[in-house]
Image: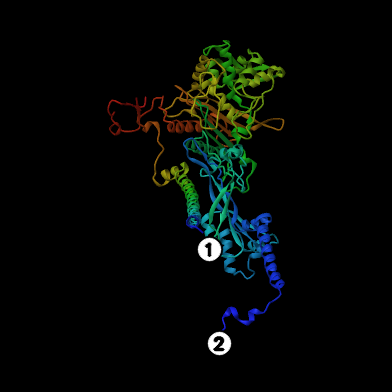
């Protein structure tokens, strides 16, 4: 068999028509063109559709959480803070029908709801339902461990108030959406609230964020807020109120402590109160911040202002004697005192709180002068504290005053003020005639006040106010161990309907300490004391004394009154070195 | 194809590979960063919680209560106080 080479095989000699191979070539070419066009389309012009598909699988826009600012006291102690908590959400459709009874009861127990209630929520028509909000993390963890399908958890914040009811009226509270509802939480909502941000990331198959594509808007944490309140002083004042309300079966009570050097509010306490951590069945009575929002006729606590105006105008001197007598008639009304005096000096009028003596001085004043005085000490204007609901009280224009009104106003009827306004007004005596601008925020600089009366008058009035707390005065109960104190009592009939209630009173005491160089003004108000007396000197003065003693001790203020030592001499410390001087309770 | 083209081709391939490697590294670093940031947030929350707990344990009402009832202590007064003035 002869070999035939491949190239000379007779089969190849066969000639096919040329067009057939051309056609095939052309079809292949067309095929490639189609592929190229498609590729250009997919990668170029019609790209957005596919890009979207791709992004959907990997791109994520996620929230960047921001926290609400804390509220701190003057020493940086936490008064309100936000902790992470979980919202427990159920998707009723995804919850299996045959969920074991045991698991439901376990869940109900953890959520602290009844089983029937829980089942009702599972049967809900809605897409998703909140089972419970603001659940603590450890409980949320136990719920997750139950492994019930169709139950999810979301991050949220829970606001907590460690000081509880003692601080409730100042700090206030937020709602479940973390928005301020009362107190500072409401007043400073804008600053405290955080603003969550958003950013874009690429997520991989395992759900990890593998690449950041930038921040859409950055998160902004809420700013912390530092108050001037001293939580120790606040607790002290609050406890005193609680004690008086119990002792005298009073309806309510309020107290405020003001640092007269800086104008800072150290304490502002109210009773009744509430627990901001568990707020259910809250009544308006509990929520009211009486110190700032309740106005009342200040009674005798206003007398020092009318009298200091008379001193200022040179109408009287502290030792000027005045005849008092049984009663004094102004217009159609007879003004009387609780005790009868024949003659009193101006100092004694303050000490014994004589209405007649005060009216005698006040009637020598022009209505405009008196009005200007009241205006200057802040009556009739809401204190600029930045606190929601602070009221102005009532001070009618002097042009409409009739003589009897001028007379009654001088001893505190016919005008009204809040306890806070009264406390601040007393700073003119404590600060040598200057009214201090009050603040609830911590400040480090000494503010400039407005001079209302001269320093001389203020010092004279301080001496008289100190007499009030000494033997023969109306408030011997205000005496404080170790410190010289001074102040003025007040007892006012409560207004009821159109007139005054005969058996309902408010007792107050507004005073300052230590008298050698006043640091604080303390005002205490007791509303409707029903047992054990009702005079300001009886119900409010003892609380004043306790608050002063505790506050000055926490402020490290040296006693300025003689103290009887109660400790053995041997136990006392010896002066140590030359840098220390030990002063044995001067 | 001359030699320079081949060298350039090899360099191109190396660059491409290193780009892929760099991207991979970026991503793993980013994952680590994410994890660290999550940890930071968690620790921050822990700190807030501990701060709250500390405050809860050191608040005046609790201290007063324990001092009076358990430790039978009495409130201090100026009569039992030695005042030391540092000049």
Decide: few, some or many residues near mark 2? Use Cα within 10 Å; few <14, some 14-19, many ≥20.
few
Q: Percent position (x, y) of residue A170?
A: 56, 37
Q: Is residue A148 above or below residue A16?
A: above
Decide: few, some or many residues near mark 1? Use Cα within 10 Å; few <14, some 14-19, many ≥20.
few
Q: Is residue A427 above or below residue A47?
A: above
> Residue A359 falls in which quadrant of the image?
top right
Residue depicted at 45% across the width and 29% down the height: A480
**Can residue B37 be spotted in the picture?**
yes
The residue identified by callout 1 is A145
Q: Chain of mark 1?
A: A
> Which residue is nearer to you in this view: A288 or A38?
A38
Q: Is residue A473 above or below residue A524?
A: above
Residue depicted at 70% across the width and 65% down the height: A30
**Can residue A250 be spotted in the picture?**
no
Toward the bottom, the furthest residue is A1
Q: Residue A2 — which label?
A: 2
Residue depicted at 54% across the width and 20% down the height: A434
Picture quarter with the N terminus of chain A: bottom right
Badge 1 element: helix
Kindly report the distance in space between the C-alpha atoms of the residues bearing marks 1 and 2.
Answer: 88 Å
Q: Chain of mark 2?
A: A
């Amino acid at each position: 068999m002869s070999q035939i080479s491949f190239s000379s095989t007779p089969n190849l000699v066969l000639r096919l028509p040329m067009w057939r191979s051309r056609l095939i070539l052309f079809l292949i070419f067309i095929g490639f063109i189609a592929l190229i066009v498609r590729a250009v389309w997919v990668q170029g012009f019609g790209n957005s559709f596919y890009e979207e598909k791709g992004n959907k699988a990997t791109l994520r826009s996620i929230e960047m959480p921001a926290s609400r600012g804390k509220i701190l006291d003057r020493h940086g102690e936490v008064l309100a803070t936000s902790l992470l908590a979980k919202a427990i959400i159920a998707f009723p459709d995804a919850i299996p029908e045959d969920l074991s009874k045991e698991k439901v009861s376990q869940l109900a127990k953890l959520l602290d709801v009844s089983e029937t209630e829980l089942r009702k929520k599972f049967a809900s028509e809605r897409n998703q339902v909140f089972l419970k909000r603001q659940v603590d993390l450890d409980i949320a963890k136990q719920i997750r461990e139950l492994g019930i399908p169709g139950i999810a958890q979301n991050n949220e914040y829970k606001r907590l108030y460690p000081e509880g009811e003692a601080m409730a009226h100042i700090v206030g509270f937020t709602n479940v959406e973390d928005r301020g509802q009362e107190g500072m939480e409401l007043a400073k909502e804008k600053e405290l609230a955080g603003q969550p941000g958003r950013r874009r990331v690429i997520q991989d198959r395992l759900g990890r964020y593998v690449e950041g594509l930038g921040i859409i808007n950055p998160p902004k944490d809420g700013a912390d807020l530092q108050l001037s309140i001293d939580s120790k002083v606040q607790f002290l004042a609050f406890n005193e109120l609680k004690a008086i309300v119990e002792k005298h079966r009073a309806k309510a009570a309020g107290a405020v402590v003001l640092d007269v050097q800086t104008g800072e509010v150290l304490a502002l306490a109210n009773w009744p109160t509430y627990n901001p951590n568990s707020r259910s069945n809250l009544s308006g009575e509990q929520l009211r911040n009486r110190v700032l929002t309740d106005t009342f006729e200040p009674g005798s606590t206003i007398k020092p202002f009318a009298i200091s105006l008379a001193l200022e105008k040179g109408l009287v001197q502290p030792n000027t004697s005045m005849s008092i007598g049984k009663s004094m008639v102004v217009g159609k009304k007879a003004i009387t005192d609780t005790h009868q005096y024949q003659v009193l000096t101006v100092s004694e009028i303050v000490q014994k709180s004589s209405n007649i003596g005060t009216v005698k001085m006040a009637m020598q004043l022009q209505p405009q002068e008196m009005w200007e005085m009241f205006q200057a000490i802040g009556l009739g204007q809401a204190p600029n504290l930045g606190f929601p609901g602070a009221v102005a009280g009532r001070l009618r224009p002097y042009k409409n005053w009739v003589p009897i009104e001028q007379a009654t106003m001088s001893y505190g009827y016919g005008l009204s003020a809040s306890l806070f306004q009264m406390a601040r007004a007393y700073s003119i005596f404590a600060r040598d005639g200057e009214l201090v601008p009050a603040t609830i925020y911590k400040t480090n600089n000494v503010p400039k006040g407005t001079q209302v009366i001269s320093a001389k008058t203020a010092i004279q009035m301080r001496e008289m106010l100190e007499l009030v707390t000494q033997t023969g005065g109306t408030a011997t109960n205000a005496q404080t161990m170790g410190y010289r104190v001074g102040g003025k009592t007040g007892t006012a009939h409560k207004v009821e309907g159109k007139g005054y209630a005969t058996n309902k009173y408010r007792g107050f005491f507004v005073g300052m300490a230590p008298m050698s160089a006043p640091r604080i003004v303390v005002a205490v108000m007791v509303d409707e004391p029903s047992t054990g007396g009702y005079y300001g000197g009886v119900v409010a003065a003892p609380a004043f004394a306790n608050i002063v003693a505790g506050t000055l001790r926490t402020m490290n203020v040296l006693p300025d009154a003689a103290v009887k030592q109660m400790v053995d001499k041997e136990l006392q410390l010896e002066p140590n070195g030359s840098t220390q001087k030990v002063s044995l309770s001067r | 194809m001359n030699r320079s083209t081949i060298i350039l081709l090899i360099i191109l391939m190396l660059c491409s590979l290193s780009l892929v490697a760099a991207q991979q590294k970026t991503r793993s670093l980013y994952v680590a960063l994410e994890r660290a940031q999550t940890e930071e947030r968690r620790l921050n929350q822990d700190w807030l919680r501990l701060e709250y707990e500390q405050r809860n344990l050191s608040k005046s009402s609790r201290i007063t209560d324990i001092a009076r009832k358990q430790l039978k202590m009495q409130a201090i007064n100026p009569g039992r106080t030695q005042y030391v003035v540092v000049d």
